[in-house]
Image: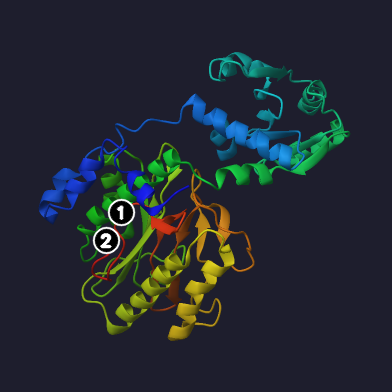
Amino acid sequence: MFSRRGFLRIGGLSISTVGIVNSLFSQNPGQQQSKLENMVAGIKPPTSEDYEARQENARRLMSTHKIDALFLIGSPDMQYFTGMSTWVSERTTGVILHRKGKPVWVVPAFELEGWKESIPSGHEIRAWQEHESPFKLIAGIMKGLGSGNGGLGLGSSVRSFISFGLRRDAPTLRLLDGSIITEGCRSVKTEKELEYMNLANKITKLAYQEGFKNLKEGMSPQDLSGAISAAHRRMGVSGSGGPQFGPSSAFPHGSRVPRTLRDGDVVMVDGGCSVEGYRSDVTRTVVFGKPSDKQRAVWEIVRKAQMEALRAVRPGISCEEIDAVARKVVDEAGYGPAYAYFTHRLGHGIGLEGHEYPYLVKGNKLRLRPGMTFSDEPGIYIYGEFGIRIEDCFVVTEDGARVLGGMEAMGIDQPFG
């Protein structure tokens, strides 16, 4: 499905802005400053045909798993299947995907006219008044579909009051875990989705590269974050990078202790952006000034763990095996065992959410398939000193894996290859 050669076309020739990306690498740092241009102006959003194909895939999985319908509220799941979403409120609002045709929307009656402006033509809309039970309405819809005693899958974002209300007011329905449908569809990306993700990761890496030019003694993490956000904006997206300086870099998700940049500090930045809703997630770790021998050695261990994990990726291998490959490198280098210094899983799925199913972690025996996308982010964290993490996202191809956005780190002083 996705070969290495095919991936070179994905996020490359079909993106009108690829020339901008390539031109950046032929410029010196001073010239690069003026070459950060809008990189998403020519990107086309998903079409109605894309959403119909996703719904058809859901219908096939529903048939396979004997689920009659799937109920989704405002969430990335709703966005994925319909292109729409809504805020989460105390009033039950959602969409029913079912095996017999177009989706059916359930909305509060006082918002009906507003929903009519947005819901795709051909979709049925059913409204409930303030004194009525939306759960009885859902039961009635299921009965009308011939599934009054059938299985209704609930998306993973469905709130507990909705599941409790359905149990109370629609007792004949079998409420099921709908994640087998949502995750089954969303975990494997199409070529168009990979185009968005490849570009998003490229943009974030370029933004970090630009931001690192601003490193100076005494600056705050907020100063660096602002420079990275500004670089993202110049390329047409809203994006960020969360920096940690010095000992704070030993906290995988950051420390609250305020610090300013000093000579010899490790600088770790983790963040991303989105293109048409599809996320990037990138971490780079450098040193302001000359790295110590220990900083350099730990960086090399982490990079080796990242590369060995990537080399091990292939269709059919389990998620936990990829985590084990990276962890073995760290353990054998003296920073084990288990979670002693490499304190978290190797990676997470990524797509419309920065962290989504599935996960590269011990115990997850799910087999990789072409089109699945993950972060690859080993780290070593030494409290009181520093932490090192390097993160790139990749897609599983037919014969291995390919890093999204390119620009892999080559050294602690060469973070963008």
Q: Nearer the viewer, residue 380 or 82?
A: 82
Q: Residue at x 42, y 56 (%)?
A: 393
Instruction: Judge from the rendering whether residue 28 lies leftward or rightward of residue 117; answer left or right.
Output: left
Check disc 1 and give the amino acid type: Lys
Residue 315 can be seen in this image: yes
Q: Which mark is residue 213?
A: none
Q: How many marks?
A: 2
Q: In the image, residue 250 lies at what x, y percent?
A: 42, 72
Contact (CB < 8 A) between labels 1 and 2?
Answer: yes
What whole-number distance in Å separates the C-alpha atoms at marks 1 and 2?
7 Å
Q: Which mark is residue 416?
A: 2
Quarter in which the C terminus is drawn: bottom left
Q: In the image, residue 255 lies at what x, y percent?
A: 44, 65
Q: Which mark is residue 205?
A: 1
Kind of element beneath mark 2: loop
State which quadrant residue 259 falls in. bottom left
Q: Does 7 appear above or below 287?
A: above
Q: In the image, residue 329 lies at what x, y percent?
A: 45, 78
Please rate how many residues cluster around mark 1, counting C-alpha atoms within 10 Å: few if below 14, some from 14 to 19, many from 20: many
Q: Nearer the viewer, residue 166 or 249?
A: 166
Check disc 2 and give the amino acid type: Phe
Residue 239 can be seen in this image: no
First reached walking from the N terminus: tag 1 or tag 2 = 1
Q: Nearer the viewer, residue 171 or 371?
A: 371
Q: Residue at x 42, y 44 (%)?
A: 194
Please rate how many residues cluster around mark 2, counting C-alpha atoms within 10 Å: few if below 14, some from 14 to 19, many from 20: some
Instruction: Judge from the rendering whether residue 104 lies leftward or rightward of residue 42; answer left or right.
Output: right
Q: In the image as oriented, which residue stretches furthest toward the right?
A: 172
